[in-house]
Amino acid sequence: MSSRITPLTDPAHGANSRRLAWLASDADSIPVGTAFLRLFDSPEQEHLAELTLQVHPVERRRQVGSQLLDAAVAAARDNARRCVIAQAEDGAPGDRFLAARGFRRVLTLVFARLPLAEVDTARLTGIVEQPHPGYQLAAWQGTVPDDLARTFAASRRAMDDMPMEDTDYGTVAWDVDRVRAAAKAIEMRGEQLHTVVAIDTSNGSIAGFTELVTPGNGTGDGQHYGTGVLPEHRGHGLGRWMKAESIRQACRHQPGLDGLLTDTAASNGPMRDINDSLGYTPTHTTHQYQLDL
């Protein structure tokens, strides 16, 4: 059975990407599936497209997903993309669908959750108050303060060597404008960005950071966006120190939150150890797939 595939106008453009969209509908014009293709525009990621595809459960195995995929892949080629990436939960229909259509598995992510009602705040305080000679913690909400903006942008290279296994993701170049644009985008979505950093007291530069995004109304679950320590500052326990302070601040300042979510590459043993030590419990696993064009 063939569905009608209709290209849509999608306003979800960002400072460094734009998005294409398609709607699949049946003979009665009832929507049965959607596909979104994000095209990254930064110079270091112009080769990359990211696919999100959904088909109504009743309509699966009727070629709806294949038609949407064909439209998205054709658009990726038309836009001179080298690869398309997509993500699916382990064992879910999308996991089998992507594997059957030429995508190869390139990365496995472990998702975990920390229920804040179960957090031992006294233990967190003990972790945060442990001395880390040569470093001090600082924190802010929203956009980075002007006096820290330059070294905060420079500290983003801490994520350059995070385990991405075989994903052709590219290296994201950060500057002050991009850091501020990212914070503004979160604000425009009605969410709150909370950042904790470790500062090298010898020169005032930022040695590492951790970011948490929470719902604007302070309820539900927050989402960790990234934790990174510059290579030259690793081995001092800064990642666990910063993340413990981020959790402690969330408990103090947003008591209505239910929990905190995080995802980590299965091969990133050090970060998974940090999460385990702070009480995060794995919830599910997803796989990232890549189609080379």
Image: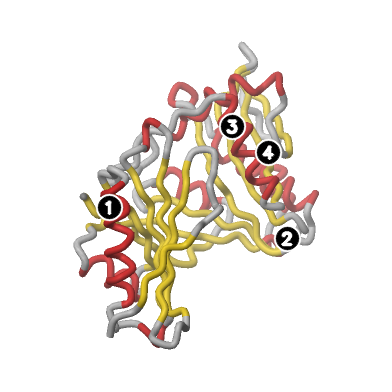
Q: Tell me the tag on residue 75.
A: none
Which of the pair 223/182 is nearer the observer?
182
Instruction: Decide which of tag 1 and tag 4 comes sooner along the chain.
Output: 1
Residue 187: horizontal and vertical position, in percent? 70, 45
Q: Quadrant of the N terminus?
A: bottom left
- The residue carrying pointer 1 sits among few (fewer than 14), some (14 to 19) or many (20 or more) residues within 10 Å by Cα, namely some
Q: Which residue is mark 2?
A: 257
Q: Amino acid at mark 3?
A: Val
Tag 1–tag 4 contact (CB < 8 Å): no
Residue 287: horizontal and vertical position, in percent? 34, 60
- Count of numbered tags: 4
Give the mark toward the camera: 1 or 4. Answer: 1
Q: Tell me the tag on residue 128.
A: 4
Give the mark toward the camera: 4 or 2. Answer: 2
Residue 206, compared with residue 77, is above or below; it is: above
For label 4, the SS is: helix
For label 3, the SS is: helix
For label 1, the SS is: strand
Instruction: Decide which of tag 3 and tag 1 comes sooner along the chain.
Output: 1
The quadrant in which residue 258 appears is: bottom right
Which of the pair 56/213 is nearer the observer?
56
Q: Tell me the tag on residue 179.
A: 3
Residue 215, compared with residue 231, is above or below; it is: below
